[in-house]
Image (cartoon, rainbow, N blue to C red):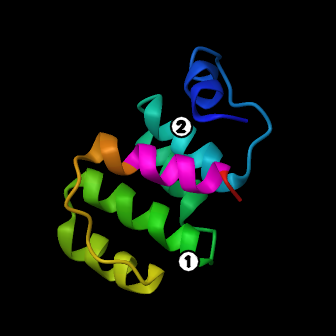
Amino acid sequence: MTFTDFQQSLQQESPPSFSDLLSALWWDAKGQWEKAHEIAQDVYTNDGFWVHAYLHRKEGDEFNAGYWYNRAGKSKSRLSLDEEWENIVKALLEK
C-alpha cells in the first residue's frame, strides 16, 4: 500500500486491514484520538512508543509525549503534527 492509498482509505467508514499502529493513525486522522490512543498504548514496540508519543504530543501533553519519544529512542519531534503523522505512516508502510 502506498501513502496515497492510505490517505484515500480515509474516505471509508472503517479502516482496511492494517497493522494496529496504522489503524491507530487512521483513526487519529478521522478525529478519533481516543480510539487511536487505545490501540497504540497496547503496542509495546519502538514503533508503538513512537505513535504513542505523537498522540500525546497532539493531545498537548508534552511531558508524557517526551517520555514516549524517549522509550521509542527518538528525539521529540519539531515537525508540525501533520508532518509527523505523515512521516510515521510512511515509515510504517515501508515495514
Relative to 72, is 84 on the left or the right? left
Location of the N terminus by quadrant is top right
Amino acid on which disc 2 is placed: Trp
Q: Residues within 10 Å of mark 1 (few under 14, many from 20)?
A: some
Residue 41, by quadrant, is bottom right
Q: Position of residue 39 (x, y in %)?
A: 60, 56
Amino acid on which disc 1 is placed: Asn
Region of the chain picked out in magenta, as a range: 85-93
Q: Position of residue 75 (x, y in %)?
A: 29, 77
38 vs 27: above or below: below
The number of callouts visible is 2
Q: Which residue is mark 2?
A: 27
Q: Which residue is mark 1?
A: 46
Depth check, mark 2 against mark 1: the one in front is 1
In this view, the residue farthest toward the top is 11
Location of the C terminus by quadrant is bottom right
Q: Nearer the viewer, residue 35 or 28?
A: 28
Q: Is residue 5 magenta?
A: no
Q: CA distance from mark 2 to mark 1?
A: 20 Å
- Give the residue at x 22% y 47%: 80
Q: Principal SS element in the magenta part?
A: helix
Q: Position of residue 11 (x, y in %)?
A: 58, 14
Does dot 1 land on a helix, a strand or a loop? Answer: helix
Mark 2 or 1 closer to N-term? 2
Q: Nearer the viewer, residue 38 or 83?
A: 83
Relative to 32, is 66 on the left or the right? left
In this view, the residue farthest toward the right is 17
